Image: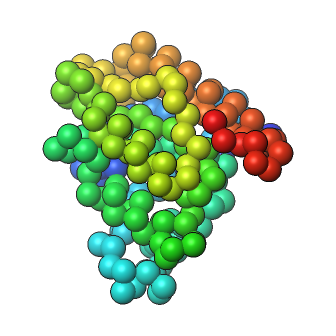
Amino acid sequence: MSSHVRILGIAGSLRRGSYNQAALRAATLLVPENSEIDLFQLDRIPIFNEDDEKRPPSSVVELKKRIRSADAVLIVTPEYNYSIPGILKNAIDWASRPDGDSAWSGKPAAIMGASPAAIGTARAQQHLRQIFVALNLFLLNTPEVVIADAAHRFNEEGNLVHEPTKRLIQELLKNLVDWTRRISSAPAGEASP
């Protein structure tokens, strides 16, 4: 890996005005020096069908290519019914298939999320952590970025205006970049957290 760290950023929301899309956009401005966040939108990923996994649609081929070419992954998830949204789970499933051809395996990763609710996206993030174990992603554990009361953290234009949240995202991204460099420089078999 070069000294420049490329992070693939994926938001698990398609909604215009999404707090999670806004949080991901904010992250692109808060990323450390010598790193960048490349955004991938999930709006063209079709519903997963195992019959098509060996001949995936072009949007899925592109998703897997972008995951593989990234040094790390940042997932920004809303919380729907105490879990992650279907669109995000669908993309995760596509990129992990067919068996033996997962684009996720071995990637350093971080999670964050925003919600108008008082506990933010804590439950969704916990479910995502469970999924990451099955995907063999090397998840950064701290800091946890659970943006609660999102309506007061972003302005009407969707810009993050809450300074403590900005600092927390900066810390997460710095740790992710450091974690990615650490993992990529570790001898084989020593990359696990």
Q: Quadrant of residue 51?
A: bottom left
The image shows residue 50, relative to residue 70, as above or below, that is below
Q: Is residue 18 left or right of residue 7?
A: left
Examine the rendering and report whether any part of residue 121 can be seen. Answer: yes
The image shows residue 5, relative to residue 141, as above or below, that is below
State the residue at coordinates (75%, 42%).
190
Q: Quadrant of residue 118?
A: top left
State the residue at coordinates (43%, 81%).
53
- Rendering coords of residue 155 (x, y %): 28, 25
- Rendering coords of residue 138 (x, y %): 59, 43
Q: Quadrant of the C terminus?
A: top right
**Farthest residue, direction top:** 164
- Please tell me how many numbered marks the rendered image carries: 0
Examine the rendering and report whether any part of residue 24 can be seen. Answer: no
State the residue at coordinates (42%, 60%).
92
Q: Nearer the viewer, residue 14 or 53?
A: 53
- Rendering coords of residue 37 (x, y %): 57, 43
Q: Quadrant of residue 161?
A: top left
Q: Is residue 125 left or right of residue 188?
A: left
The image shows residue 39, relative to residue 66, as above or below, that is above
Q: Nearer the viewer, residue 184 or 167?
A: 184
Q: Nearer the viewer, residue 71 or 128?
A: 128
